[in-house]
Image: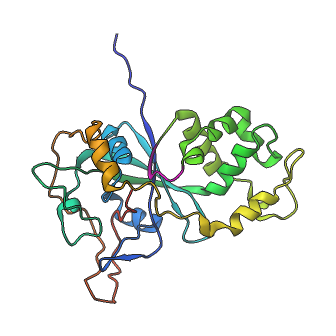
């Protein structure tokens, strides 16, 4: 009897607002992703995030792309759904001295960093903000009526997410119950009045004022990861066996439709970007 492998599920973050590093714009918005369809997820420079990417398998996994929503509200959240289309292969940008995330300790003969290719599948019909997910995690036992459709078990699943408990990591594994709740939220919505503080949707025994307060403090919710490892941490992790090689892949690929900005040139190329990552 053959055993069916349970697909692994992932959440990945990107940076949608323009930010110039070494003369290149490292932004990658949901519009960019939808335009190029498939993009390498290069520039990851955190061992834990890298190791999670090396676990990803093509055509059997569904991933979530989480980023700033750059059109409707200034918030962090889940904007689109994607699939892993190419398994981990060496990240050639690490040994490109002109790249924003060049790593002089990585080389072609002994690659340290890896990346996968992701293919855009669809936008979330309703943007699922981090503020909303945190609100759900804080109201597991008293969900407002606008969110009752996810049920108490769904709320508990959200509360247990790495995104809630250690949200800075840019690549995260998620469980199927979480995926199911997020897809339900993205499909049904219904919490606008709750999030925008129009006087309705108060939870049983608790108001939603903390949600509005969190939205005002959005500037503190940066996509710049704070878990980037120092050189000492990297060396220690290598000793602990984190720096394990994956089978060699397409080490010299250049990606599709990559957006570049020339050194010292103030004009930004308007062609859609490929994956332009935060460092971790």
Query: Height in image: 2 above or below 47?
Result: above
Instruction: Looking at the picture, tell me which residue is in the foreground, 72 or 230.
Output: 230
Instruction: Residue at 50% x, 63% y: name it.
Output: 223
Quadrant for the N terminus, please. Answer: top left
Instruction: Residue at 29% x, 77% y: name it.
Output: 22
Q: Of helix, strand and loop, which mostly describes the magenta segment? A: loop
Instruction: Residue at 31% x, 47% y: name it.
Output: 85
Is 235 on the left or on the right of 6, as rendered?
left
Residue furthest left in the image = 109
Residue furthest front in the image = 232
Query: Height in image: 182 above or below 190?
Result: above
Residue 195 visible within the image = no
Where residue 261 appears, x then y in whole percent?
Answer: 29, 80
Q: Which residues are magenta?
A: 167-172
Where residue 108 appears, x then y in whole percent?
Answer: 12, 54
Residue 177 visible within the image = yes
């Amino acid at each position: 009897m053959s055993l069916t492998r349970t697909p692994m599920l992932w959440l990945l973050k990107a940076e949608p607002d323009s930010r110039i590093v070494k003369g290149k714009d490292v932004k990658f918005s949901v519009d960019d992703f939808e335009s190029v369809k498939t993009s390498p997820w290069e520039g990851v420079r955190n061992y834990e995030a890298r190791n999670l990417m090396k676990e990803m398998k093509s055509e059997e996994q569904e991933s979530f792309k989480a980023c700033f929503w750059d059109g409707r509200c200034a918030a962090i959240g889940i904007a689109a759904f994607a699939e892993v289309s190419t398994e981990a292969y060496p990240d050639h940008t690490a040994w490109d001295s002109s790249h924003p995330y060049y790593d002089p300790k990585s080389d072609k003969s002994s690659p340290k960093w890896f990346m996968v290719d992701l293919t855009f599948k669809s936008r979330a019909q309703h943007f699922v903000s981090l503020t909303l997910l945190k609100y759900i995690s804080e109201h597991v036992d008293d969900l407002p009526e606008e969110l009752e459709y996810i049920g108490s078990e769904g709320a508990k699943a959200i509360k247990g997410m790495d995104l809630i408990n250690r949200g800075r990591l840019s690549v995260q594994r998620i469980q199927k119950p979480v995926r199911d709740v997020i897809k339900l939220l993205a499909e049904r919505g219904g919490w606008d009045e709750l999030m925008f503080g129009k006087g309705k949707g108060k939870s049983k025994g608790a108001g939603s004022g903390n949600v509005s307060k969190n939205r005002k403090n959005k500037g503190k919710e940066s996509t710049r990861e704070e878990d980037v490892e120092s050189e000492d941490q990297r060396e220690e992790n290598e000793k602990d066996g984190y720096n394990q090689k994956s089978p060699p892949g397409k080490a010299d690929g250049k990606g599709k439709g990559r957006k570049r900005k020339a050194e010292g040139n103030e004009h930004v190329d308007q062609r859609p970007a490929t994956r332009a990552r935060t460092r971790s």
